[in-house]
Image (spheres, helix red, strand yellow):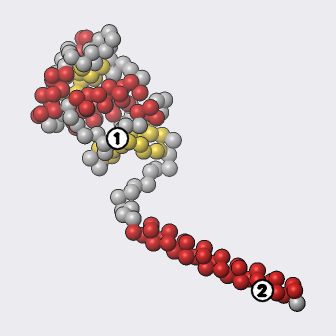
């Protein structure tokens, strides 16, 4: 009789645990169903997407694409990432004027980082008719320069995402 009593108590506790677990899972499912996950996009299994501000995390990584204004633009190099983002930023006349004012002012240790003269640079990247950006840098420094330029021309880069290979 003792054994039957013990088994009965175990079964009762088991039933209580099952009810508790089921109610916990129901709460989780309800929380998830209330979330707006329609805008969440799953990454390709071979890439990871990070915000542009993750500059230190890009060092040594191979870029795949830029996600800009909700559009995915394939980019095989970091230099091309800079070009894509700056071309978009300079579509606005006010920002273009600010960029012209940075020309020959935003200086590195040995050369201009933004210039109207490509001869002043080691690896100039033409971003518009008469503006060039120095790109002879490692990934982290190049992204830091890009962010500095974007800050100086008042461009909101908070929604720009970068996809890199896993």
Disc number placed over residue 101 in the picture, else none: none
Tag in front: 2 or 1: 2
Rate crowding at label 2 as few (under 14), some (14 to 19) or many (20 or more) other CA atoms within 10 Å: few
Residue 99 as seen in the image, left or right of residue 107 = left
Task: Write the residue at 39% across / 62% down.
Answer: 37
Residue 39 as seen in the image, left or right of residue 44 = left
Rate crowding at label 1 as few (under 14), some (14 to 19) or many (20 or more) other CA atoms within 10 Å: many
- Residue 13: image quadrant is bottom right
Residue 107, given in percent of the width and then of the height, sits at 27, 15
Task: Write the residue at 51% across / 41% down.
Answer: 166
As drawn, 163 above or below 29: above
Marks 2/1: CA–CA distance: 62 Å
> In the rendered structure, which disc, 2 or 1, sits on the residue that comes first in sequence?
2
Q: Taking the image as drawn, is residue 130 in sight?
A: yes
Viewer-closest of 145 and 17: 17
Residue 76, given in percent of the width and then of the height, sits at 39, 34
- Going by the picture, which residue comes out furthest to the bottom? 1
Residue 109, given in percent of the width and then of the height, sits at 33, 11
Quadrant of the image for the N terminus?
bottom right
- Residue designated by label 2: 8
As drawn, 50 above or below 5: above
- Residue 91: image quadrant is top left
Disc number placed over residue 66 in the picture, else none: 1
């Amino acid at each position: 009789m003792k054994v039957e009593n013990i088994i009965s108590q175990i079964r009762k506790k088991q039933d209580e645990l099952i009810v508790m677990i089921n109610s916990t899972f129901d709460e989780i499912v309800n929380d998830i169903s209330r979330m707006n996950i329609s805008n969440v996009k799953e990454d390709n299994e071979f890439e990871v997407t990070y915000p542009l501000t993750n500059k230190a995390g890009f060092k040594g990584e191979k870029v795949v694409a830029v996600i800009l204004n909700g559009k995915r633009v394939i980019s095989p190099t970091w230099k091309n990432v800079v070009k894509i983002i700056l071309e978009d930023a300079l579509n606005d006349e006010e920002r273009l004027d600010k960029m012209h004012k940075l020309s020959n002012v935003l200086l590195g240790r040995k050369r201009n980082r933004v210039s109207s003269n490509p001869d002043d640079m080691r690896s100039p990247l033409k971003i518009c008719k008469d503006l060039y950006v120095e790109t002879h840098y490692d990934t982290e420094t190049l992204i830091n320069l890009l962010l500095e330029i974007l800050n100086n021309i008042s461009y909101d880069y908070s929604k720009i995402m970068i996809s890199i290979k896993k």
